[in-house]
Image: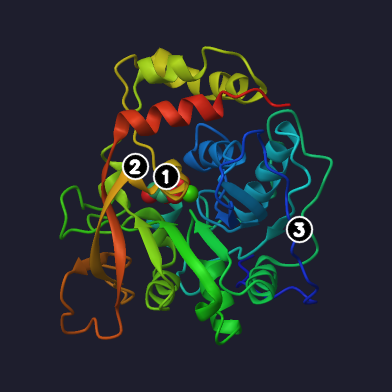
Amino acid sequence: MIVRPRLAAGLAAGVMAAGLALAGAASAEPHKVIFDTDFGMVPQDDGYALMLALHSPELEILGITTVAGNWSLEQGTADVLRLLEIAKREDIPVYAGANMPLMHEPSEYARTTYGSWWSDAPATPPPGGFAAKQAESLGAVEYIIDTVESQPGEVTILAIGPLTNVAMALRHAPGLAAKVKQLVIMGGAVAFLPDGAGNMTPGAEFNFWVDPEAAKIVLRSGIPIQLSPLNVSRKSNMNRGWFEKLVAVETPFTKLIRERGGRLYEDDPELVVHMYDQIAVASLIDPSLVTTTELYVDVDANPGISYGTSLGSPRLWPGAEGARKIAVQHELDWVRFIEMFIERVAQPIP
Ligand code: BDR
Ligand code: CA
């Protein structure tokens, strides 16, 4: 059965300030973050991204909101709860969100290509079994609205899946956009810049392709946006050497990484994979890791061969009226990034 996203009952206040994961917090105030994810366990990038965020004192994760994307909503929610349990961070609340994009109907292509956003299959047990803790009864959209409205100008939304939850929050709460401090988004591929081909269709990146209407609403919202598209992801090169450094010391995180990701490099020692959501997180921790350029970016939400394709330009063009200028990441200091990533993810869990 396919169910359109819906608001859960109740609008209770949902702000829960989580403690910092590590001693030695950065001197500046940490970014208050809502972590919006189509979560999957490592070696999926959302899993790595959350490990990095949990071990970064520059970020205070207020709550995690889940959305259908790489997996069904149920699977992503079950997996993120389990990772928090492994991390001993059950204090961070999890809110389940949209189980379908706003408009996108699952086609044969969607069902057979990549990602299970269309699925309503129940979750299978995460590694080690289902977490003892469950998701909050409040829905993700209400949580986003409540949290931003109760702390205007203070909350950053870090969105690393389809933008359905964020778009719904903006639609349900007029004026919300002006109260969001900033949005950091992994999504899109900008053909105006090098390395701008899509990964789901020739032009469209996965997160934007799954929910192009949501991406368009969010990019046009006027919220200050840092976009981390495939252009910057493609500057990363996670090879076997870096992987071995990552898992050299055994911790609960690196054990999970080795068990679930090591096989990839055993099967193909020359394998090089890109990092996606991890870069979006890292760019919030240390913006000097990436180079950005200001472009108008808009998304094609018309059914057809370019559905979900993002276009960018220094100037507005016909049809893109209403698009906003945002910061688009395109270069990455790979070595500095991966060294920081390894050092943090491999930290012991207290
Ligand atoms: C994006 O799509 C998902 O598969 C990844 O988690 C990432 O957010 C890359 O196109
Ligand atoms: Ca993702």
First reached walking from the N terminus: tag 3 or tag 2 = 3
Q: Which residue is mark 2?
A: 289
Q: Determine whether 214 is above or below 235 in the image.
A: below
**Real-space CA distance between mark 3 and mark 2, rounded to the nearest whole angstrom:** 29 Å
The quadrant holding residue 313 is bottom left
Image mark for residue 61: none
Of the residues shown, which amino acid type is indicated by label 2?
Leu
Of the residues shown, which amino acid type is indicated by label 1?
Asp
Q: Which residue is mark 3?
A: 16
In the image, is 243 to the left or to the right of 138?
A: left
Image mark for residue 286: 1
Instruction: Let me know if residue 71 appears in the view.
Output: yes
The quadrant holding residue 241 is top left
Indicate how the structure is coloured in the image.
Answer: rainbow
Badge 1 marks a residue whose secondary structure is loop
Instruction: Let me know if residue 121 appears in the view.
Output: no
Q: Quadrant of the N terminus?
A: bottom right
